[in-house]
Image (tube, rainbow, N blue to C red):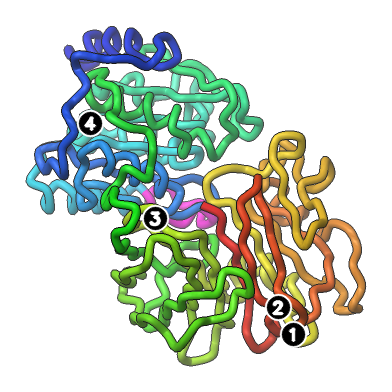
Amino acid sequence: MNALFPLALTIAVALSPALQSCGDDPQTPTPTACDPARRPIVMAHGFLASGDTWASFSRLFEANGYCQSHLIAYDWNTLAFNRDAAVVGLDSAIDAALAATGSDQVDLIGHSAGGGLGYAYLADPTRAAKVAAYAHIASNPAPLENTDPAPAGPAEAPVPTLNLTSTGDLIVKGAAIPGAINLVLTTEDHYQAATSARAFTDVFGFFNGGARPITTDPTDAPPADPKAARTISGKALTLGENTPVPGFTVSLFELDSTTAQRKSTADATAIVTADGSWGPFTVKPDAHYELFLEDPTGTSRPVHYYREPFASDSHLVYLRALPPPGTLAGVLISLIPFADEHTVLIAFSSSQGVIHGRDTLTMNGETLSTAELASAERTSIAFFIFDDETDQTSGGEVASFSRVFAIFLTAIDRYLPAGGPPITLTLNGRVLVVPSLPSSTDGAIVATFD
């Protein structure tokens, strides 16, 4: 174990919000703009996820003096079940971060399945030497494929490790890692363990010698001026596999927030690059936008993304293209009958699960967050809503979806006539309005709650 680890352990535990209320702290840094001397942070997402898992953390790191260029979300295919390839990709991402920033080491975060990836990465001493500190979030304390009663992992590697779990997480039952800093959140679900302000405070303190963040308000991220324009960018990847879709177009449209109608022609357009990147676009801070992802060849159906206003700059705005047949995610999408008589709608809660009894999700006044559709054990973040039998009638849950993925996703049989009135979705009081589009021609609609 690194000789500095006992000191880091003492400081972090003493100052952790789990043990001490917020207050003045002599170690708290003074507010600063971007500080390029900070170590870069590389973040690995979990199962079925993408780099936008880290959008909340990234905004908070920026609000606390990190440079956007020092915050790297590593995308990997969690459906390929090829951890060796993912480790090689992670190593390349870390090498690129070191070269770009001139830093000697990075800080590393792994969430859920990304924690297993972090374990595998740190098992090699040469790779572990590139990591100054590791945050293991909502993840098993040992690689799933390792049956050794004393598996190698971060606790045995010369890397200080924070093991952050939550009693509110019903997806992964966390356990203590000997030698690590073990902190336990109390209310966060599986996704909130990697997105909440409380979780961020623990991770920030661990990476910064126990110092508390200046702010845990993401609206303090640049530009903090509520009237200033925002800059957004991100990636366009296939759902599930996270394969880039180069050549696709991304178009930006400002919307009438009450009707979801486009106000004019596209405000901006970009071509997706080889690694999936698009943008940057400039947006108004108080406007609703549609981001339209289209395959110019027509091979893949288009996807319309409807967003809440952007509270700050964001470089992790992700657009998921519909996956091709023959992939595991493609099997899931093949269960959806696209037809011009009805709308295919996906309600996406990007930073938390929707849990019955805690959260309220409604569509046109109908409650979708029922005990059946939104159990805590499922922790659904995406609700797929479509006319299951194309019979223009509504039913219950689409069981074929849960047979493919029993967690995180819920499918509901609802007939939403194309060309009908706009559809109003409300999540915990936040409202998004989307149009009723013919799904065979216009593809899928994704309403994204940040």
In this view, the residue farthest toward the left is 102
Label 4 element class: helix
What's the residue at 68%, 65% (across, down)? 332
In the rendered image, the vertical position of residue 448 relative to residue 291, given as above or below: above
- The tag earlier along the polypeptide, 4 or 3, is 3
* Residue at 53% across, 81% down: 262
Q: CA distance from mark 4 to mark 3?
A: 23 Å
Q: Which residues are magenta?
A: 76-86
- Frontmost of labels 4 and 1 is 1
Q: Of marks 2 and 1, which one's residue comes earlier in the chain?
A: 1
Q: CA distance from mark 4 to mark 1?
A: 59 Å
Residue 78: x percent and y percent? 50, 52
What is the three-letter code of the residue carrying label 2?
Ser
Would you name the residue on which mark 2 appears? 436
Q: Is residue 40 visible?
A: yes
In contact (CB < 8 Å): disc 3 and disc 2: no
Please report contact status of discs 2 and 1: CB closer than 8 Å, yes or no.
yes
Name the N-terminal-most of marks 3 and 2. 3
Question: Which residue does the numbered mark 1 point to in the structure image?
Answer: 419
Q: Secondary structure at mark 2?
A: loop
Q: Earlier in the sequence, mark 4 or mark 1?
A: 4
Q: Which residue is denoted by mark 3 in the rendering? A: 75
Dot 2 crowding, Cα within 10 Å, few <14, some 14–19, many 20+:
many
Packing grade of label 3 (10 A; few <14, some 14-19, many >=20) is many
Amino acid type shown at disc 3: Asp
Residue that carries the numbered disc 4 in the rendered image: 125
Left or right of 376? Residue 41 is left
Residue placed most toward the observer, 154 or 384: 384
Q: Residue at x 89, y 78 (%)?
A: 392
- In reply to whether residue 85 is colored magenta, the answer given is yes
Q: CA distance from mark 3 to mark 1?
A: 36 Å
